[in-house]
Amino acid sequence: MIKRIFGLECEYGLTFSPTGRVYLPIEKILGYIFEGLIPNSWPSNAFLTNGARFYQDTGCHPEYSTPECDDLIDLVMHDKAGERILESCLPIAEERLREEGLSGDIFIFKNNTDSLGNTYGSHENFLMRRDVDFWKVSEQLIPFFVTRQIYSGAGKILRVSGKSQFFISQRAQHIHEKTSSSTTSSRSIINTRDEPHSDAEKFRRLHIILGDSNMSEFATYLKVGTAMIVLTMIEDGFTIPNIALEEPVKAIRDISRDPTLKKSVKLEDGRSLTALDIQQVFWERAGEYLQSHAPNKIFSEIHDEWGRVLQLLGTSPIDLVREIDWITKQWLMENYMANKSCGWDDPRLSMMDLQYHDISRQRGLFYLLAERQGIRKLVDEEAIELAKTIPPQTTRAKVRGDFIRFARAKNRSYTVDWTYLKLNGYWEETILCMDPFCPFNPRVDELLSQVPHNRLYP
């Protein structure tokens, strides 16, 4: 079982609700968000001291890419740190509004669709071996990713034939291909863009763009953790025969529109299985794989949680409230409908659907529920607060974060990307960082020695 680098890219929804009649374009609002995060002297498309990248994506969405992680809990922590970083920008941005004589509320949502039906993504990246056949791996992975939504979906109210109903996944209805190099015009289950940001002879990138953004830390853990196990076992030759879906794109949509989990989908060999059945096949095969190798504590824990969740999905899904996003959201809405004697078409439910994803801990429905009734947490707030500025200590992200601290402490202009660090201007220097597993660089260590520790970490 090889060590692996992985990360998440999350595009956030952004909107402004003015208290008066003056409405600002969303580009202006996003500019205020950037001002709250990145000093004016630094680039607006920037890497941060925690090694993450923050930038404007297509459609004027703020996007946060986690630093490279090789530990699953680190990934969950840094994904949450992205929420907290953006949340901390809200009061600063709203103060900028007041300085211009305007007032209103800025909302940032960690979701995947807006009121006009546009979608924006939550992408997963896994460094994978170059020496395995990418297309054979993809064919094995597609049934897994299509059915994984039964525990990774974020839930969504959609109108079908003029009637509102609850769907498991936000992204499922926006997927059009099995594989594609595009992330917008022909969204696919697996994106084929090959940008490993490392030694291209050894590695390539597995880029997954069909997943939902998760508020639940546990859902993020399970979504990424199960994918890690399945990718690793397939790379090692532990494949599953006769698991290909007849129509994967149709299957992902059919599964999403059936929260009872009873809908079956057709396989190429003529069988019909439910999403739960297919996930059970992958879980059992993963168990065989783990038993055939030396014990791996992390994989064993993920596999145990995966099995527990599948068992509850089949017998008592309500027991997964506060762990799985779509089940939690559906439970909240059904309780509301029972109390208010209304149905899925009630506009207040659509508002709840959106408010669940508000990253503000003072008003977001997910966080209000967490405060009052508890949501399963995997990392504490102190660790998340540290992750806002401190990178993972076991990957290349540490080198990047340290370099940015040095450049800012010395007031030097710099340019940073995933694979290089550059001091601009006088004594210009470029430092290559091609190994994502390496958390140190002699030249960066030498630069750090020029700055007192209390200036790097005030």
Image (cartoon, rainbow, N blue to C red):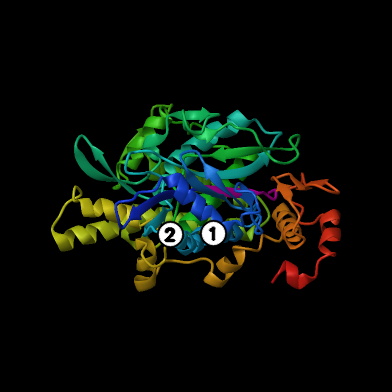
The type of residue carrying mark 1 is Gly
Cα separation between marks 2 and 1: 16 Å
Which percent across, then down, holds residue 319?
34, 62
Element carrying mark 1: helix
- Left or right of 445, for residue 124: left
Disc 1 crowd rating (10 Å Cα; few below 14, some 14-19, many 20+) is many
* Mark 2 lies on residue: 359
Magenta region: 1-10
Q: Sequence order check: which comes first, mark 2 or mark 1?
A: 1
Evaluate whether residue 236 shows in this view.
no
Which percent across, then down, holds residue 74?
61, 60
Disc 2 crowd rating (10 Å Cα; few below 14, some 14-19, many 20+) is many
Which residue shows up at 21% across the image and 51% down it? 347
Q: Is residue 4 magenta?
A: yes
Which residue shows up at 83% across the image and 46% down it? 428
Nearer to the camera, 150 or 426: 426
Q: Is residue 62 magenta?
A: no
Say the numbered circle drawn on residue 36.
Answer: 1
Which residue shows up at 56% across the image and 66% down it? 384
Which percent across, then down, holds residue 274?
36, 40
- Left or right of 249, for residue 455: right
Placement of the C terminus among the 4 image quadrants: bottom right
Which percent across, then down, holds residue 341?
13, 58
Which residue shows up at 73% across the image and 50% down it? 414
Q: Is residue 429 above or below residue 309?
A: above
The type of residue carrying mark 2 is Ile
Nearer to the camera, 173 or 321: 173
- Left or right of 437, for residue 133: left
Q: Is residue 449 above or below residue 8?
A: below
Element carrying mark 2: loop
Nearer to the camera, 357 or 394: 357
